[in-house]
Amino acid sequence: MKRIVFFVFLAAPFLIQAQSPEEAVQQVVMSAYVNGIQNNGPIEDIRKGFHPTFAMLRLVDNTVKPFPIDEWIASIEKNRSEGKISSVKTEAKFIQIRVVGTAAQVELELYREGKRIFTDYLLLYQFAEGWRIVSKTYFRHP
């Protein structure tokens, strides 16, 4: 019996697969962005997955207008307090996740009720505390 327990103890680290960088990036995007922002998840999850310097870069009247994460969160909190939140779940389809060293790029499509509503391009960096979203551009589908 002692031999079996000893073998399981020694083999355990090899039986547990480590998460790949792509899986870690996908997990952050799902937790902070898809479930957090798009599906009304906890603000704490949003703050954990977005770097404080994050800005969404919006193309408005042929000008790029940044939208910092603190302003985005304030807008979300205001909408939630006023009951202006959608009960329709947003689904995500990962088109591409590319990781090179400590940088990552994600192409993501968002759907509501089977209709594609956004194509997002997210950039992430891996910090000491893990992967965090640092930038976003997007296309809103008609």
Image (spheres, rainbow, N blue to C red):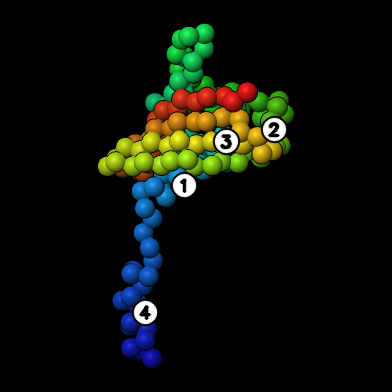
The residue at which mark 1 appears reads as 27
Query: Can residue 48 be seen at all in this image of the molecule?
Result: no
At label 1, counting other C-alpha atoms closer than 10 Å, the crowd grade (few under 14, some 14-19, many 20 or more) is some
Task: Look at mark 2 in the image and give the residue it sits on.
Answer: 86
- For the residues bearing labels 3 and 2, Cβ distance under 8 angstroms: no
Of labels 3 and 1, earlier in sequence is 1
Distance of mark 4 from mark 3, alpha carbons?
Answer: 43 Å
Residue plotted at (32% across, 37% down): 103
Q: Report how far apart the C-alphas of labels 3 and 1 lie in the structure.
A: 16 Å
Q: For the residue marked with disc 3, what is the amino acid?
A: Leu
Q: Is residue 5 left or right of residue 114?
A: left
Under mark 4, the amino acid is Val
Q: Secondary structure at mark 2?
A: loop
Identified at 35% across, 38% down, the residue is: 104
> Could you give the CA–CA distance between mark 2 and mark 4, rounded to whole angstroms?
48 Å
**Amino acid type, label 1:** Gln
* Contact between labelled residues 3 and 4, with CB atoms less than 8 Å apart: no
Q: Nearer the viewer, residue 15 or 114?
A: 114
Quadrant of the rendered image containing residue 36: top right
Q: Which residue is mark 4?
A: 8
